[in-house]
Amino acid sequence: MQKLTIQFLLINCFLAIVLISCGSVTKHYTPKKLDKTSYTVPYFTDSKTDYVYKTNISVYGNELSGIFIAKKINDTTHRIVFTTEFGNKLMDFEISETDFKVNSIVSELDRKILINTLKEDFRLLLKKEYLIQEQFENSSNDIYKSADGKRDNYIFISKKDQKLEKIVHASKTKEKFTLLFSSENNIFAEKIQIIHQNIKLKIELNYFKSE
């Protein structure tokens, strides 16, 4: 039953891709003189820390819960493990900006569309350095544009406390998905949301506090 539930939620639902309307990503932002040429993300950088989060995946109105574990294993690579709430391993992979290696995956999840979506999501989540080409602002954020192949990343830094609040991954005309961060100290993110704009997929990570 558990395998059938996972298969239904995380395979069939991924096949129904819905495109959103087009428009300039920066049309609501004001250009600003560039004040930095690079940005270093403060999260997931400590190789001594196991980053453990309770995970909730919402896909086309269906819910699936589990555990997400990320570990920095060298200067460029993180290892990520997904398990069920009962500790059964679903997926184990290593990821960097240039490489992706699947160590193990249950057969129900071994689908190219799912793997490629998660690879793109978590490659951006764990990316450390951004080179900045342009800068914008709105009422509450300084916004830095960083080229990412044929797409761009927009990094939102709070004007109030200089915390990283959001990263938007976009094409030239539309947003693809967004990372939202909630952090008390701008060193560790207690809550992370990955929200897709072109498919009905949302991943929520809440820091798992051991008793």
Image (cartoon, rainbow, N blue to C red):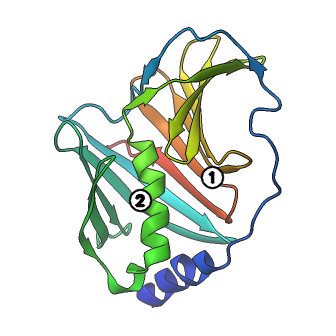
Q: In which quarter of the image is residue 62?
A: bottom right
Q: In which quarter of the image is residue 58?
A: bottom right
Relative to residue 47, is residue 25 drawn left or right? right
Relative to residue 6, is residue 44 drawn left or right? left
Q: Is residue 9 above or below residue 95?
A: below
Residue 205 visible here = yes
Residue 142 visible here = no
Residue in view at x 63 percent, y 52 percent:
195
Question: Tag 2, which secondary structure?
Answer: helix
Say what amino acid the circle numbered 1 marks. Ile
The image position of residue 54, as x and y in percent, is 43, 53
What distance separates the C-alpha of mark 2 from that of mark 1? 14 Å
Counting other residues with Cα less than 10 Å from the Cα at mark 2, is it few (<14), some (14-19), or many (20 or more)? Answer: some
- Viewer-proximal residue, 184 or 98? 98
The image position of residue 40, as x and y in percent, is 40, 24
- Viewer-proximal residue, 32 or 56? 32
Question: Tag 1, which secondary structure?
Answer: strand
| Residue receiving disc 1 | 195
Relative to residue 205, is residue 145 drawn left or right? right
- Viewer-proximal residue, 60 or 175? 175
| Residue receiving disc 2 | 119
Quadrant position of the C terminus in the picture:
top left
- Viewer-proximal residue, 163 or 36? 36
Q: Quadrant of residue 109?
A: bottom left
Say what amino acid the circle numbered 2 marks. Lys
Marks 2 and 1, the one that precedes in the sequence: 2
Residue in view at x 56 percent, y 50 percent:
194
Q: Is residue 161 above or below residue 187?
A: above
The image position of residue 152, as x and y in percent, is 58, 40
